[in-house]
């Protein structure tokens, strides 16, 4: 089977500053200011062509950071990501320019992908129809609700037909009818053997849609395997985790990140 996404030893370090003056000092002076924070720590996983991989994990575990790195939107601090084909990310307002209208955003995205005028003219009505934005298509994106931004992002990404589709919580903001239409489109992608990454807090959607699950915990891979194998373990972890007090959660975090 062909490998589609290869993530090797990927780490992402952010700097946390307690004062904004530290941020400026960190740029100007050779001495380091601020605290290092690892959003991802030596993450490894491989997805094969046609895999639908769900990313799960509690808030802040690194799901969006990893999605953004795979999509090429955020650079990794260490490690490598190799993709076999182009990737498109669908996340609430990902890559949309707020001052441009919906239609201008469609055109800009198509131009950036190297499409010519004829191709854009063919694709644009399809995207507009899918997005169901009606007259708002000619309004600036800054006037859109998060659901409308998500619909536009979704409509653009699925219609440009990428080899790898990354969907980060984009279904959670729209209404039910749009989520259903989007899920159908995603099934169509799956049937055509495209590779997909799906980030959602809905275990139900994960079970319905994914083949494999990557469970991230405080920026590390806790488990990677089939849905059947990983989801039950994740669900029982969540039950335990929810019962923990704030202090127990902090202790748990310390234990995991220092191990
Ligand atoms: N630009 C940034 N600067 C500093 N820290 C960041 C930045 N972006 C993300 N982080 C931190 O990295 C960690 C991982 O964040 P990320 O958004 O990837 O988690 P997530 O699993 O997608 O969370 P959620 O389920 O809440 O969406 C969090 O602790 C977050 O605060």
Image: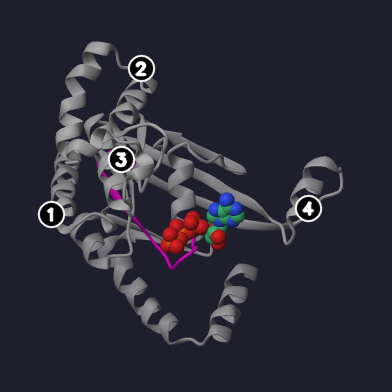
Q: Is residue 30 above or below residue 86?
A: below
Q: Nearer the viewer, mark 1 or mark 2?
A: 1
Callout 3–callout 4 Cβ contact below 8 Å: no
Which residue is label 1 attached to?
Answer: 177
User: Is 253 in the magenta?
Assistant: no
Cα–Cα span, label 4 and label 1: 47 Å
Callout 3–callout 1 Cβ contact below 8 Å: no
Provide residue 11's location: percent of width, then percent of height. Answer: 58, 49
Q: Secondary structure at mark 3?
A: helix
Which residue is label 4 attached to?
Answer: 21
- Give the residue at x 52% y 52%: 43
* Mark toward the start of the polypeptide (2 vs 4): 4
Q: Secondary structure at mark 1?
A: helix
Callout 3–callout 2 Cβ contact below 8 Å: no
Provide residue 7's location: percent of width, then percent of height. Answer: 47, 43
Q: Nearer the viewer, mark 2 or mark 4?
A: 4
Q: Is residue 222 visible?
A: no
Q: 111 or 189: which is nearer to us?
A: 111
- Give the residue at x 20% y 24%: 123
Q: Which residues are magenta?
A: 48-61
* Mark toward the start of the polypeptide (3 vs 2): 2
- Give the residue at x 62% y 57%: 38
Which residue is label 3 attached to?
Answer: 153
Q: Is mark 1 within 8 Å of ligand 1?
A: no
Which residue is label 2 attached to?
Answer: 114
Corner quadrant of residue 194: top left
Q: Is residue 165 visible?
A: yes
Provide residue 130's location: percent of width, then percent of height. Answer: 16, 38
């Amino acid at each position: 089977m062909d490998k589609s996404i290869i993530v090797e030893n990927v780490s992402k370090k952010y700097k946390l500053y307690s004062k904004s003056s530290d941020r400026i000092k960190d740029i100007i002076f050779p001495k380091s200011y601020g605290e290092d924070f690892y959003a991802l720590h030596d993450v490894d996983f491989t997805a094969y062509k046609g895999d639908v991989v769900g990313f799960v994990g509690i808030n802040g575990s690194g799901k969006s950071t990893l999605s953004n790195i795979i999509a090429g939107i955020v650079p990794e601090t260490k490690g490598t990501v190799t993709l076999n084909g182009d990737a498109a990310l669908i996340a609430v307002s990902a890559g949309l320019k707020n001052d441009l209208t919906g239609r201008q955003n469609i055109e800009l995205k198509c131009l950036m992908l190297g499409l010519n005028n004829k191709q854009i003219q063919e694709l644009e009505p399809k995207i507009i129809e899918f997005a169901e934005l009606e007259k708002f298509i000619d309004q600036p994106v800054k006037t859109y609700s998060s659901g409308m931004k998500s619909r536009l992002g979704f409509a653009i990404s699925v219609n440009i037909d990428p080899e790898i589709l990354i969907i980060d919580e984009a279904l959670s903001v729209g209404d039910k009818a749009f989520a259903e239409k989007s899920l159908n489109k995603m099934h169509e992608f799956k049937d055509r053997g495209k590779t997909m990454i799906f980030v959602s807090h809905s275990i139900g959607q994960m079970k319905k849609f994914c083949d494999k699950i990557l469970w991230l915990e405080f920026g590390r891979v806790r488990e990677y395997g089939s849905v059947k194998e990983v989801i039950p373990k994740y669900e029982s972890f969540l039950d335990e985790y929810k019962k923990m007090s704030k202090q127990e959660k902090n202790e748990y975090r310390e234990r995991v990140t220092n191990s």
